Amino acid sequence: MERNNLAFYDQQASQWWNETATIFPLSKLNPLRFQYFDRFIPNWRGLKVLDVGCGGGYTCEFLAQRGARVTGIDPSAACIEVATDHAEEMGLTINYHVGVGEILPFACDLFDVVVCVDVLEHVQSVAATVTEIGRVIQPGGLFCFDTINRTWQSRWLMIWLLEDVLRQIPRGIHNWHQFVPPKELHQLLTQAEFSQVTLQGFDLFGRTPLAQITHLIHYLRTGEFQIQFDNHTGVMYIGTARMS
C-alpha cells in the first residue's frame, strides 16, 4: 500500500466544505491550535500571512475572518480551485496559488507570519520547506506550525488505530518515516536562522493508549476534540519560531 498518498486531497477537494465529508473534521482543529498561536499573536488584523499546504482553505478562511491578509499555497490544483470558489462565496479576499513548500513563488521577507499546520509530515523535504519559509518571512516574523512526532505512540495511534482499524483517517495518508521528531525540527529551524523556538505537545487524544481510546470514543460520540497543551510530544506537537 502506498504511504503518504496525497491523491486523497484531490479526491476530497469537491467535498471539502461539506460537513459530512471525511476531511471536514480538520476544520475543527483551527480554533484549538490558535489557542496556542494566539499567545504569540493576540491580534491578526492586517498581518500578511502565508498558509503553506492550505488545502481547500480551512485555515486561510479562519485567518481572513480575523482580519489577516491571507495567501494560501497547496500542491493540489483541485483544492486551490475549491478554496478560491468558496472564499468568493464567503466574500473573503484570499490570494491562492498552486505550489509546494520546497519552492515558494514569493519574494524574500514578504510575510509577517507563515502558518504550516498538518503539513510538514507530508512534504518531500522538511529541510527545504523550513528554509523556504524562513526566506519569505520578514525579520522578526513568526512561523507557526504543528506536525507529528516519529515515535511508537504515533505509529500506534495515527496509523494502526486511526487509519487501519477505525478508518477515521484514510489508509495510506501517512508515512511514519516522514513524521518529524521535535529535536530534528528544532535543528532545522536553527539552521534556517530561526530563534525563540517553542514546542509543546498538541494533545488531542491523551498520553496513554487507554486515554487515547477514551478520547476517541468521546470524539466519535460528540464530534468534538478534547485538547490540552503539555510536555507530551509523543504524538502531535505544536510550536512557533521567530525569524532572526
Image (tube, rainbow, N blue to C red):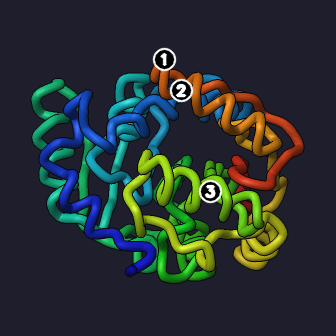
Say which residue label 3 marks.
147
Q: Amino acid at mark 1?
A: Thr
Q: Give the number of the disc on residue 58.
A: none
Say which residue label 2 marks.
219
Q: Amino acid at mark 3?
A: Thr
Numbered disc 2: secondary structure: helix
Q: Classify 10 Å Cα crowding around label 1: few (below 14), some (14-19), many (20 and above).
A: few
Between marks 1 and 2, how big is the CA–CA gap?
5 Å
Mark count: 3
The image shows residue 50 at horizontal and vertical percentages of 43, 52
Quarter assignment of residue 21: top left
Q: Pointer 1 and pointer 2: residues touching (CB < 8 Å)?
A: yes
The image shows residue 73 at horizontal and vertical percentages of 33, 59
Residue 65: tell me if it is visible: yes
Say which residue label 1 marks.
222
Between marks 3 and 1, how big is the CA–CA gap?
24 Å
Residue nearer the viewer, 90 or 104: 90
Q: Is residue 10 above or below residue 91?
A: below
